[in-house]
Image: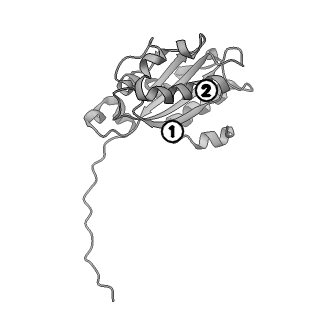
């Protein structure tokens, strides 16, 4: 695992860095913060992109206890109260299973970019951050999530949450100067 500074340098989205910094601050001297240490209202601009997964009964029974409004657009359905196995199935199941197992077992944060975060959502490019939480300071019992959708290749970019991340930009035509002959 890279140092905290090296891990932070891998975070490409401003929201990822903001949440990671708050997570580290909330942990204090501990390896990871507990759920009561984390106040989502301290990062109000990120609330639509935040999720919380309860893994106290194991990853096989893990479920989203909280899912911001933009997660509905990313995953194509409301995911609050749903099990991980119901959301991450099909081709993406192995990918997410490894991500969550690593975070839960090692107690370390993880980040990445994936196309097609869940079944039927291949048009979505997801910038994700997963941060462990632990009530006893040793065993991960919750995983804090930040999911930000990247550029879309279909008209789904017109959804409110997509435009918060990457507004569509129409390039201006560029006029090139006259060609110059080189001798």
**Image point 46% across, 29% down: which residue?**
147
Q: What colouring style does the render use? A: one colour
Image quarter in which the C terminus is found: bottom left
- Label 1, residues with CA under 10 Å away: few <14, some 14-19, many ≥20: few
Residue at the spot of label 1: 14
How far apart marks 2 and 1 lie (CA) works out to 22 Å
Residue 84 disc label: none
**Image point 62% across, 22% down: which residue?**
104
Give the SS element for disc 1.
helix
Who is closer to the viewer here, 175 or 120? 120
Splitting the image into 4 quarters, where does residue 56 fall? top right
**Residue farthest along the right direction in this orientation:** 29
Q: Please give the count of numbered marks on the rendered protein.
A: 2
Classify 50 as above or below 127.
Answer: above
Give the SS element for disc 2.
helix
Query: Relative to 35, is 167 on the left or the right?
Result: left
Q: Position of residue 117 (x, y in %)?
A: 42, 30
Splitting the image into 4 quarters, where does residue 100 fall? top right
Query: Relative to 150, is 42 on the left or the right?
Result: right
Q: Position of residue 179 (x, y in %)?
A: 27, 78
- Label 2, residues with CA under 10 Å away: few <14, some 14-19, many ≥20: some
Image quarter in which the N terminus is found: top right
Mark 2 or 1, nearer chain start: 1
Q: Position of residue 60 (x, y in %)?
A: 54, 15
Residue 103 disc label: 2
2 vs 1, front mark: 2
């Amino acid at each position: 695992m890279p140092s905290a500074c090296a891990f932070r340098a891998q975070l490409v989205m401003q929201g990822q860095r903001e949440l990671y910094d708050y997570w580290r601050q909330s942990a204090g001297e501990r390896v990871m913060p507990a759920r009561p240490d984390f106040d989502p209202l301290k990062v109000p601009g990120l609330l639509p992109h935040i999720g919380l997964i309860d893994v106290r009964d194991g990853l096989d029974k893990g479920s989203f206890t909280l899912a911001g409004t933009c997660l509905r657009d990313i995953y194509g359905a409301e995911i609050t109260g749903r099990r991980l196995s119901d959301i991450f199935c099909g081709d993406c199941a192995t990918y997410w299973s490894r991500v969550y197992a690593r975070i839960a077992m090692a107690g370390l944060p993880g980040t990445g970019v994936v196309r097609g975060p869940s079944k039927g959502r291949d048009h979505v490019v997801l910038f994700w951050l997963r941060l462990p939480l632990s009530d006893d300071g040793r065993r991960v019992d919750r995983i804090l999530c930040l999911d930000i959708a990247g550029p879309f290749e279909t008209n789904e970019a017109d959804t409110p949450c997509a435009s918060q991340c990457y507004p569509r930009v129409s390039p201006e035509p560029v006029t090139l100067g006259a060609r110059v002959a080189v001798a």
